[in-house]
Amino acid sequence: MTKIATIGCGLIGQGWATVFAKAGFDVAMYDPAPAAAEHALAAMTQRVADLVAFDLIASSDAPAILNRLTVATSLEEALQDVVYVQESGPERVEVKREITERLDTLAAPDVPIGSSTSGISASRYCEDITGRHRCLVVHPINPPHLIPAVEIVPTQWTDPRIVSITTELMRACGRETIVLTKEIDGFVVNRLQGALLEEAFKLVGSGIVSASDLDKAICDGLGLRWSFMGPMQTIHLNAPEGVEQYVERYGAMYRGFGLGPYDDVDWKEIVDSGLKAQLETLIPVADIPTKQAERDRKLMALLRHKAREQTDH
Amino acid sequence: MTKIATIGCGLIGQGWATVFAKAGFDVAMYDPAPAAAEHALAAMTQRVADLVAFDLIASSDAPAILNRLTVATSLEEALQDVVYVQESGPERVEVKREITERLDTLAAPDVPIGSSTSGISASRYCEDITGRHRCLVVHPINPPHLIPAVEIVPTQWTDPRIVSITTELMRACGRETIVLTKEIDGFVVNRLQGALLEEAFKLVGSGIVSASDLDKAICDGLGLRWSFMGPMQTIHLNAPEGVEQYVERYGAMYRGFGLGPYDDVDWKEIVDSGLKAQLETLIPVADIPTKQAERDRKLMALLRHKAREQTDH
């Protein structure tokens, strides 16, 4: 059984269909507006061609990928024999509740029902659904067929087996999974973006820097490393003895900026109570010099890539 | 006159010397510890070789670049006939004051004296210096010879002409300049990093997500776009009518996350009072679809680059 249903054929649904078909799944696309589904199928041809042009799909694979995509004329047909359902409907709690109820009635037991919602925790619509144990958020970053990160957010009722089946499936589709232990508004990605935007608005709004110069701080500064290494491993490598030393050296400096409700967030305590252990499992202190050299090589390779891009266009 | 002095020969000083020599300047490197300067000069050979290996310096240019580097045996010798001084000494106010005083005495009038400090605003050490009008912070992001972003931070006494001469010189050296209108703790880059870290510590500390998964939210998510487009232009392109519409649509959502002292930062007011105008000058609303397509092409090219990197290693 290698069939997945994508419900809702807007840009997000189309992105998901591309991801699943590329990974070898048969994909049944369904939209309550039949014209939307047909239009989406046509748009997929261009999307796959774009991926071929950038070597992200081998051109020899493209026909098979497109062949795996079909438009289902009913929800029943879409859900027949699926191993997974990805719902990308409108962002309204009532609509989510109604459609998830129907999906739960029609899909075989224990097939996970993931929602693409970026703003609605699944507990807000699935409490009264019989199969609430298989409902969860599987939030892509736009555009889903390009950005690998996917947030997996269970409710208090989600069966841990559903979380692990979904995580495995997403990994099999080349997704990089961010698994949350519980619901929180905005999940992780949008909270991180929001925190950075909050400071950015403050700096631009106070006239300290232009929007254009602020953007350079990221795209010619922090964002270069962040495109291949996250902020936690970045700071772990920015002190010879790792994150504990980083927080000893720079924690007070950051605190002095008055960036947030610091009373609640004690960096040192968080380091001591698990973060240090986590990061040293990923990168032991003894490996820091090697990893620093690797980071700089990746940075140089990225700069070469950016320079070539600029020459090409 | 095309000579620059770099004062202090640690990693930051070495990075600067590489930047200036690569841009065609003669560079006099000076360190109060002569052995440090000699060691730095030797280390530069490897640094330049690395850049050649990644096509960031043409191999035919490497000998000339290394030839432009000399070690000065005295501060007087280092500063003779320079057009610019970059000081990368220890991060202590007293040391900054003492060395800047000497630099001011020895360098020709109106030669800018930039400090690499990441944590000390120049007003804290230059108030009583005769030439305080030419003192300012010119803060690189580590490592300076790889990361293009440079923050230029004048004090209340800095002559605007000194700011513009320094900005032009940095641009001539291939630097991407972030010009602040006034001093603020942490400048822009570290404030943005701090805001994101604050939220990251909170999420990991509360057990909602592992450090490893949080990192994916950036290096497989937000950081991909941020490596070629800053956060302001990113949100401007994430609504069909630009930033104003983005804030209308998502402002309330971000506010709901409780990320910071929102009472002080009204996104809509900041949009109305200048941010919208700034971003529409950079990207007119009519150009948004074209720029979105360009962003997605850059994203695909970046993904191709990352995939090739992984195959190579």
Image: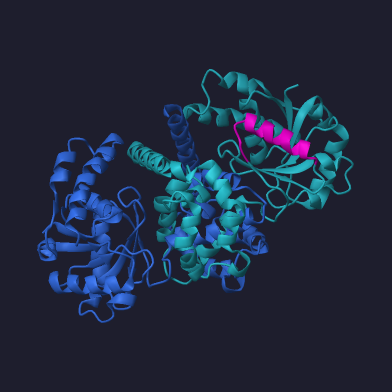
Chain colours: A blue, B cyan
Q: For the view shown, which residue lies furthest in the front direction? A: B286
Asked whether residue A105 appears in the rendered view, the answer is yes
Q: Which percent across, then down, holds residue B69?
A: 68, 25
Indicate whether A263 appears above or below A286. Answer: below
Q: How many marks?
A: 0
Our reading of the magenta stretch's main secondary structure is helix
Q: Nearer the viewer, residue A169 or A202?
A: A202
The residue sitting at 37% across, 41% down in the picture is B293
Name the residue located 39 percent from the left edge and 67 percent from the top edge. Answer: A119
The quarter of the rendered structure image containing the N terminus of chain B is top right
Residue A228 visible: no
Q: Nearer the viewer, residue B75 or A160?
A: A160
The quarter of the image holding the C terminus of chain B is top left
Against A155, residue B221 (above or below) is above
- In percent of width and height, residue B288 lies at 43, 44
Q: Position of residue A13 (x, y in %)?
A: 26, 56
Left or right: residue A139 versus residue A257 is left
Q: Name the quadrant containing residue A50.
A: top left
Q: Nearer the viewer, residue B10 or B186?
A: B186
Looking at this view, name the residue that lies furthest to the bottom: A128
- x, y (%) of residue A204? 62, 53
Q: Is residue B170 magenta?
A: yes
| Extent of the magenta region | B159-177
Q: Residue at (27%, 61%) from the top-left corner? A: A88
Q: Is residue A13 magenta?
A: no
For residue A294, side relative to residue A61 (left or right): right
Looking at the picture, tell me which residue is in the foreground, B265 or A297: B265
State which quadrant residue B148 falls in: top right
Left/right placement of residue B260 relative to residue B17 reads left
